[in-house]
Image (tube, helix red, strand yellow):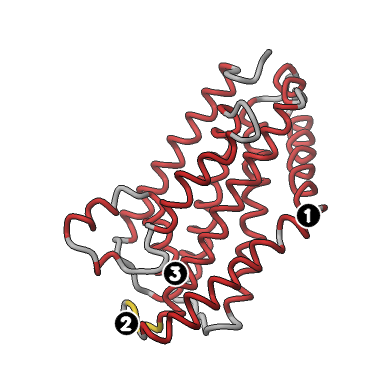
Amino acid sequence: MNLNEIMVAFYTLLHKEIRRFTRIWVQTLIPPAITMTLYFLIFGTLIGKRIGEMGGVDYMQFVAPGLIMMSVITNAYSNVVSSFFSAKFQHSVEEMLVSPLPNFIILAGYVLGGVARGLCVGFIVTLLSLLFTQLVIHNLLVVISIIFLTSILFSLAGFINAVFAQSFDDISIIPTFVLTPLTYLGGVFYSIALLPPFWQDVSKANPILYMINAFRFGFLGISDINLVYAYSMICIFIIAAYLCAMRLLDSGYGLRH
């Protein structure tokens, strides 16, 4: 395939992925907005008034970046894992694998589809957060880069989960037993400075901690983690996930029957 044909194929795949979640926006974009609104009401308005400040800022302002990031993580991940597993289940993915389309283009199409959904939901939740608190961006470049990198990472993770999944039940195991606990323990609702030194060190093994704190720095200028270290860790996880996903695609593991 020449470059023009590759770009047409990539655009077609990406367009299909975006159309997939925008066509059923009532199921893909509205539910996370409602869920995050409940979080803002319960943890921000009701509990936040009793807590007061966290990290030197109003508690509602403190949790808002974490809640935005939580919605981005969940939706970027779920978009790719459900889409690619459906293609695998219907055996339509085999048609792509036997075509001359490069594997990295296939991966890029699915991943950027997940990124698009993550960013759409993140934007909606950000607008909703303005109904509950005032968000002033401290560093726009950090906000944009972190939310984009995070969407890429969890889209890749969703792709890997979809490759290994053998049934529709399997695609819910990781979000339920891994993703949700890591998110809640990733500093969304608290600063790890409140934890004893041992548990602070344990928390630093959680990759989501780096994303939430870097994102919070972009808004509020405060973070429990050094920003350079956070970027480094996120990029390392992205490279590892990308190499793993490409290895699975190249080998055809769980995809060719």
Which numbered disc, 1 or 3, marks the residue that appears first in the sequence?
1
Whether label 1 touches label 2, CB < 8 Å = no
Residue at x 79%, y 30% (from the top left corner): 5
Rounded to the nearest whole Å, what is the CA distance between mark 1 and mark 3? 28 Å
Question: Left or right of 51: which side holds 1?
Answer: right
**Looking at the image, can residue 73 be seen?**
yes
Label 2 sits on residue: 56
Report the front residue among 180 and 129: 180
Label 1 sits on residue: 22
Rounded to the nearest whole Å, what is the CA distance between mark 1 and mark 2? 39 Å
x and y percentages locating residue 170 in the rendered image:
58, 33
Which numbered disc, 1 or 2, marks the residue that appears first in the sequence?
1
Looking at the image, is mark 3 or mark 2 nearer the viewer?
2
Quadrant for the N terminus in the image: top right
Report the front residue among 228 and 56: 56
Label 3 sits on residue: 218
Q: Amino acid at mark 2?
A: Gly
Rounded to the nearest whole Å, what is the CA distance between mark 3 and mark 2? 16 Å
Q: Amino acid at mark 3?
A: Gly
**Looking at the image, can residue 105 be seen?**
no
How dense is the environment of label 1, judged by Cα within 10 Å: few (below 14), some, or many (20 and up)? some
Mark 3: secondary structure: helix
Residue at x 44%, y 55% (from the top left corner): 183
Residue at x 42%, y 52% (from the top left corner): 181
Question: What numbered label is drawn on residue 92?
Answer: none
